[in-house]
Image: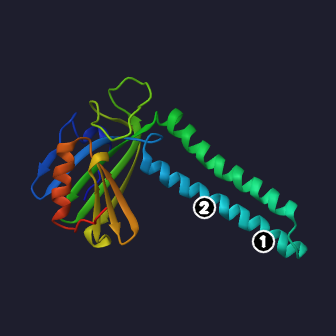
Amino acid sequence: MPSPKVLADVLPVHEVQTRAQSLRWSAAVPLVTNPFLLADVFWFALLGGSLVFIILVSGVWFTEGAIRTDDIRVSLQFASLTFGGCIAAYILLSLFFFKNRYFAVYELSDKGIYHEGSRGSDDRPSALFLHMRPCPVAGHVRAARTKGKSVSWAQANCFQDMQTMRVIHIKRGIWHVLRLYTPDNATHKLAVKYISKHLPAKNK
């Protein structure tokens, strides 16, 4: 599945392209107000804080042969700072660098799923993007940077439809493979119908 060079060349506003054996669409995806991404960042920050705590406590144990209450307290403080720093960095970057949104293009074909994400701007005013769900791109995207990813159908074994949030989780067992965001209900139904031809649906 070839990658478009820039998102501005992909789709005009609100248009979904259905080609022979493929489906393609674009969406504006929220960041700080996105509950799924917030959950991802929370677990990442929790893992980072836990690793810092374990490393510090282990270091004291190996160097001094014993762990005191003060050592645990200091380790917890550093772990808390790591956790809070990760959360704060995500929020600040999302709001001031990304304006709380990034732009995504998806293409479904018989080979699998192609996804491209980009920081950039569309024809919306430069104000913050205050949405919880993905929505259509306004006009064309002026991409600052693009990053593509391809996932074959063989890399997944089911999908989970979060219809109220217009999100589709592509999964392999309990593991998350890719998350698809659709801009409206009509596109969401088309995407679910297409994916159903290749993967079984997983109960919520």
Pick the quarter of the image with the C terminus.
Answer: bottom left
- Please tell me how many numbered marks the rendered image carries: 2
Split into 4 quadrants, where in the image is the N terminus?
Answer: bottom left
| 56 horizontally vs 95: left or right | right
Residue 142 location, x and y as percent?
A: 35, 34
Say above or below: 14 vs 73: above
Q: Nearer the viewer, residue 78 or 25?
A: 78
Residue at point 21%, 43% (across, down): 185
Q: Are there few (<14), some (14-19), or many (20+) residues within 10 Å of tag 2?
A: some
* Above or below for 152 versus 7: below
x, y percentage for residue 57? 78, 67
76 relative to 55, above or below: above
Checking the image for residue 58, the label placed there is 1
The residue at 81%/69% (across/down) is 59
Q: Is residue 22 left or right of residue 171?
A: left
Query: Residue farthest to the left?
Result: 20
Q: Amino acid at mark 1?
A: Ser
Could you tell me residue 146's position as x and y percent?
A: 39, 46
Towards the viewer: 137 or 85 = 85
The residue located at (50%, 39%) in the rendering is 94
Type of residue at label 2?
Leu
Query: Considering the numbered disc 1 on the image, is that residue within a helix, a strand or a loop?
Result: helix
Q: Which residue is mark 2?
A: 47
